[in-house]
Image (cartoon, grey):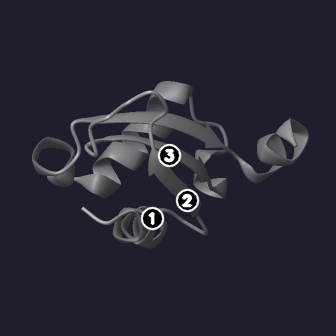
């Protein structure tokens, strides 16, 4: 699955999300990806809940197109603090 298509899928499913998807480091398999997702939808959510929202957005692609996904999720304020 094209990286841009994955970003668009996440962004279309999560409120005001900005997603960046790349191939995971040190992996030679195109199905192992890394994503950074910033969304106000994560406010007040645990890390597990944030990740579940991303997995829900990707739906069946998590079992058919993506074998592994390293996730970094942030609220907009958390992302600004990281930078």
**Which circle's residue, 2 or 1, is located before the other in the chain?**
1
Tell how many labels: 3
Alpha carbon distance from label 3 to label 1: 8 Å
User: Mark 2 sits on what residue?
Assistant: 19
User: Mark 3 sits on what residue?
Assistant: 35
> Residue 7's mark?
1
- The answer to whether marks 3 and 1 mark residues whose Cβ atoms lie closer than 8 Å is yes
In the rendered image, residue 59, in percent from the top left (x then y), is placed at 21, 53
Closer to the camera, 58 or 50? 58
**Which circle's residue, 3 or 1, is located before the other in the chain?**
1
**In the depicted structure, whether residue 73 falls above or below residue 22:** above
What is the crowding at mark 1: few (fewer than 14 residues within 10 Å), some, or many (at least 20)? many
Looking at the rendering, which quadrant does residue 8 occupy?
bottom left
**In the depicted structure, whether residue 34 falls above or below residue 2:** above
- The answer to whether marks 2 and 3 mark residues whose Cβ atoms lie closer than 8 Å is yes
44 horizontally vs 76: left or right: left
């Amino acid at each position: 699955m094209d990286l841009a298509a994955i970003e668009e899928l996440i962004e279309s499913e999560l409120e005001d999300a900005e997603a960046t998807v790349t191939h995971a480091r040190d992996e030679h398999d195109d199905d192992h990806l890394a994503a950074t997702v910033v969304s106000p939808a994560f406010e007040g959510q645990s890390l597990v809940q944030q990740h579940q929202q991303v997995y829900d957005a990707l739906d069946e692609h998590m079992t058919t197109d993506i074998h592994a996904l390293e996730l970094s999720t942030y609220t907009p304020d958390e992302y600004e603090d990281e930078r």
